[in-house]
Image (spheres, rainbow, N blue to C red):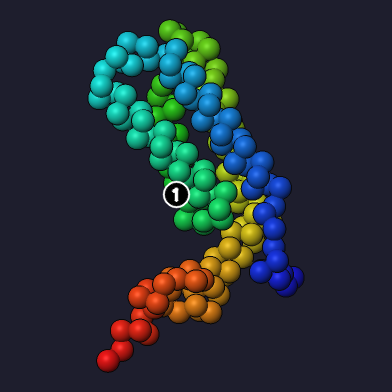
Amino acid sequence: MEHNHSQMTKPLDVSNATKLLFISFSIGILTSMFTFTSQIESLGFLIVAFIICVWYVFLIFKIMQGKNWARITFLVLFILGIPGYISLLPSFLQTHFYSALFLVVQLTLNASALILLFKKTSSEWFISQKIMLRRRDTLNPGTGGLIGSPPWCDSHSYRL
């Protein structure tokens, strides 16, 4: 099946997946505020939490832009994070039942989003975005694909 990669619009699955990821992110923020109240006073905890939040949101935005590396990075981080999630569940079930419930909801939302992101239509869209970027770079050499770049950005202007 041949697709016109330049005209391919973002599939609904990708849009829904990013919505699920934002919902999961919001649940994670709220859960962390209620579960880790004693650590919130620690500056180190706040810095690490902030960096994680910024990275998570950055990945979601890059996924929305069709960056395949972001989709794969999210998958790898999700897989690497599963043991951590599972190890937290028993203690959360004893001390923070609702946090454990929200942890399971987050896992489910993230897994569902990943399933949507790796469906055939989504994968084709991510590939089409990569092809469009390469085509743009080919059509505008020396500008990094930026149309209308200043002349000093063109590698051809440095010829002697």
Q: Quadrant of the C terminus?
A: bottom left
Residue 60 rendering spot, x and y as whole percentages: 52, 43
Q: Residue at x 48, y 69 (%)?
A: 146
Left or right of 104 in this view: 37: left
Q: What residue is at 58 percent from the left and 63 percent from the top?
A: 129
**Image quadrant for the N terminus?**
bottom right
Task: Identify the amino acid type marked 1.
Answer: Thr
Q: Is residue 139 visible?
A: yes
Q: Nearer the viewer, residue 89 or 106?
A: 106
Say which element carries label 1: helix
Picture coordinates of residue 21 (x, y %)?
56, 36
25, above or below 36, in the image: below
Give the percent coordinates (x, y) of residue 49. 35, 28
Mark 1 sits on what residue?
73
Above or below for 10 versus 128: above
Q: Looking at the image, which residue is at 47% across and 45% down? A: 59
Q: Residues within 10 Å of mark 1 (few under 14, many from 20)?
A: few
Can residue 79 be seen?
Answer: no
Question: As drawn, which residue projects farthest toward the bottom?
Answer: 160
156 up-or-down from 12: above or below: below
